[in-house]
Amino acid sequence: NNHDYFYFEHPSGSSDFNTHIFLDNTQNTKFVLAPRGFGRSSYRFFEIIRLGSVPIYIWDDKVWLPFQNKIEYSKLAIVLHISEIFNLDNILRSITEEEYEEMRTYAKSVMHLFTFEGACKEFVKLINKTITISCHAGLGDQLIGYACSEVLAHELGAEVILDMPIFSGNCPI
């Protein structure tokens, strides 16, 4: 029936009012669509998790979610291919209250990965103590990138490897 779902349209008016409505609706809704943006994902997915709701992530060509080696997304989100969209109603109705609470509990256990600090810590782990910089002809800003990577490498106690392809002309470094 019509009470199972609602459609929210942003009213005209102040952005503060719209933000309040968005936050209130998201925090008081069990499952929230996280439509992709111009890329394969969107910041809305992460907002939904941070606000305590379960995101519905629909993908068409590739699942594009971070930390897939650390997070079991089936435990904190509804992740389905676009071809399964017509099954969404049945999928949502089949989730018990206990399963829903387990999803929220699991989300809380990995929430730190969706903070700036948590994401940065994971990024640093991925660097794995080696930074490779490519130097391409004609890209003067590579010098700035190299200098920044030297600073980062020093802070991490890492090694910088300058990978320069063979080309004619002067390398900007």
Image: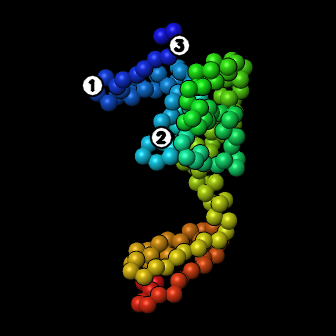
Disc 1/disc 2 C-alpha distance (Å): 25 Å
Point out residue 90 in the picture as x, y percentages from the top left corner.
Answer: 62, 20
In percent of the image, x 36 and y 23: which residue is there? 9
Amino acid on which the number 2 mark rests in the picture: Arg
The location of residue 161, given as percent across then percent down, is 60, 78
Nearer the observer: mark 3 or 1; the answer is: 3
**Quarter of the view holding residue 107:** top right
Query: Which of disc 1 and disc 3 is earlier in sequence?
Result: 3
Q: Is residue 51 among the parts visible in the rendering?
A: no
Q: Residue at x 51, y 9 (%)?
A: 1
- Type of amino acid under label 1: Gly
Say which element carries label 1: loop
**Nearer-N-terminus badge (3/2):** 3
In the rendered image, which residue does mark 1 sit on?
A: 13
- Residue 74 visible from this viewpoint: yes
- SS for dot 2: loop
Residue 53 in the figure: left or right of residue 172: right
Tell me the tag on residue 4. 3
Q: Nearer the viewer, residue 88 or 117?
A: 88
Image quarter of residue 125: bottom right
Question: On screen, 72 above or below 24?
Answer: below
Per the image, the residue denoted by label 2 is 36
Residue 127 in the image: state x and y as whole percent. 63, 64
